[in-house]
Amino acid sequence: MRIQVKSGQVRDGVQVIAALEGEQRAERLLPASAARDRQLSQLVAGSGFRGAPNETALLPKGKQWVLAVGLGKAKDLSLDRVRQLAGAAARTVRARGFRHLALPVLSERGLGSAADVAQALSEGALLGLYRYDKLKKLPKHEQGKRIEVITLVVERAGDIAAAKRAVEKAQVIAEAVSFVRDLINGPSNIVTPTYLANQARAIAKRLRLKCTVIPFTQLKRLGFGGIVGVAQGSAQPAQFIVLEYHPPRAKATFALCGKGITFDSGGISIKPSAKMEQMKYDMSGGAAVLGTVQAAARLRLPHRVVGIVAATENMPSGTAQKPGDVLKTLSGKTVEVINTDAEGRLVLSDCLHYAKRYKPDCVVDLATLTSACIVALGAEAIGLMTKDERLAARLNQAGKATHERVWRLPLWDEYKEMLKSDVADIKNVTDTGQAGTVTAAKFLEEFAQGLPWAHLDIAGTAWADKDRPYVPKGAVGIGVRLLIEFMETWKK
Ligand code: BES
Ligand code: ZN
Ligand code: ZN
């Protein structure tokens, strides 16, 4: 599919116009040229179209087709509404069997520069058109339907160059997010730890990055006790993946740690079978880390970015770790494993300790860590835990810009009490069942000592139970856009 940028009157393709909800006839249509078109505003008014967010109406106008898409109320207007509009428009146009659509680069109402809007439109369309169709034959009504060209229409010819650059950036980001979604949607019999390692190697080869993979046998020898404890019950060998982008004269160093549990059965503390199939998404953090390093390299960010992913299954077997077992982690600290289903923090403890060797300016870990985070924040916010106010503010800012929003939970030291063990330095779960998300973060904090560190719990945000305008049901690919924005706007 191709995205082109033009100015002036564009006649081919389905013409998308935007409409605000609850406004007078003339002003409610965007762009301004659509508002001036009497025939068009009458057509839209006559269709009963209200302009509610992502409402669509496909209308014939002479020999052309017009697709009106709702933007919602003017007071709620944002770049994310623009992303949603593009996603809703592109999917509707595809579903109706058209191959070309034209999207207006809206410049009204202080939405942002032409580049900002062009990027949001391109991201929304590309991410909205994503499908995971590798493993099934498409139903008849979807076969052969695909968008071939999207035209972005800018009002001033002088904006074309900036808009084109924004499109290229959006394409890089959308490709990274789609790559992440493919990994997450992929079933665990295909997306094994070895498969993830091979994907990292392939990225490294393509983009000339450094990739180091430490396989299970070596991990045992080198003392990666957290990962080994989780991995020892599985027939699939664990892989510790380090994918690194290191530009010359790098300004800052970021270490990104990802939980890469390709399937979480719970281990001996086995999960109930209802919805267990969803636990293929327990590697969402690891996948996002690989996608972010890929995007950072392709966008030539001026920073060193080290992705560290602990990839393994969590399985029950005769060789699996058992409740009560004590592990010696890479840091030397010992952990009493009360519940083998709290495995993410075990593998991450080794990642965080390993990150120290890079002397990073900042470490962020991403993990589908706790179901308690889903209870607390649902699908709308990533749980953010850090003691670093600056990191919190920057991640919050990046979350707003990308709409991958974060919400902070405390990391007060009182919570650490709950992880005291009688036999080891720390235990992996509390016995009260309270504050599940925070106590998991407190566990991680033990292994991030001395690091400027933030933890992101993406358990609720990594998987979409229902279609959204630019997130089809399934893997969201969350984290890539957030972290790229976070690193791009970084200043010492
Ligand atoms: N991967 C799960 C967390 C999870 C559950 C993510 C559901 C997404 C959806 C994690 O490994 C886990 O099982 N956590 C336990 C911890 C508990 C045993 C303290 C949980 O949250 O229930
Ligand atoms: Zn688990
Ligand atoms: Zn898990």
Image (spheres, grey):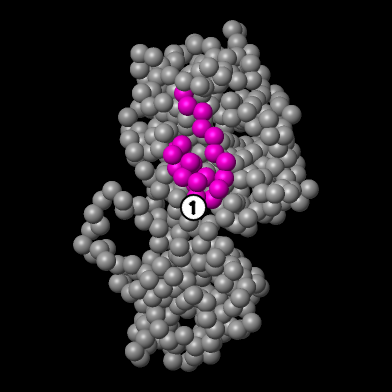
Q: Main secondary structure of the magenta part?
A: helix
Q: Is 246 in front, or is 134? A: 246
Left or right of residue 393: residue 366? left
Q: Report the number of discs.
A: 1
Q: Which of 188/402 is in front?
A: 188
> Dot 1, how many residues are within 10 Å of its Cα: few (below 14), some (14-19), or many (20+)?
many
Give the percent coordinates (x, y) of residue 313. 41, 28
Residue 23 visible in the current orientation:
no
**For residue 54, which quarter of the picture?**
bottom left
- On screen, residue 3 above or below 209: below
Please state which amino acid type lies under the numbered disc 1. Val
Q: Disc 1 marks which residue?
A: 177
Q: In this view, does 191 lie above or below 337?
A: below
User: Which quadrant of the rendered structure holds the N terminus?
Assistant: bottom left
Residue found 45% across the figure and 62% down from its top: 126
Q: Where is residue 400 in the image (x, y as percent from the top left)?
A: 63, 55
Q: Looking at this rendering, what residue extends furthest in the right direction?
A: 492
| Residue at horizontal 46 percent and vertical 47 percent from the top | 180
> Is residue 382 rendered magenta in the image?
no
Does dot 1 land on a helix, a strand or a loop? Answer: helix
Q: Could you tell whether 316 is left or right of 308 in the image? A: left
Magenta region: 196-216
Residue closer to the observer: 295 or 91:
295
Magenta span contains residue 202? yes
Q: Residue furthest top?
A: 423
Residue 362 visible in the displayed image? yes
Q: In this view, does 396 lie above or below 268?
A: below
Residue 428 in the image: above or below residue 30: above
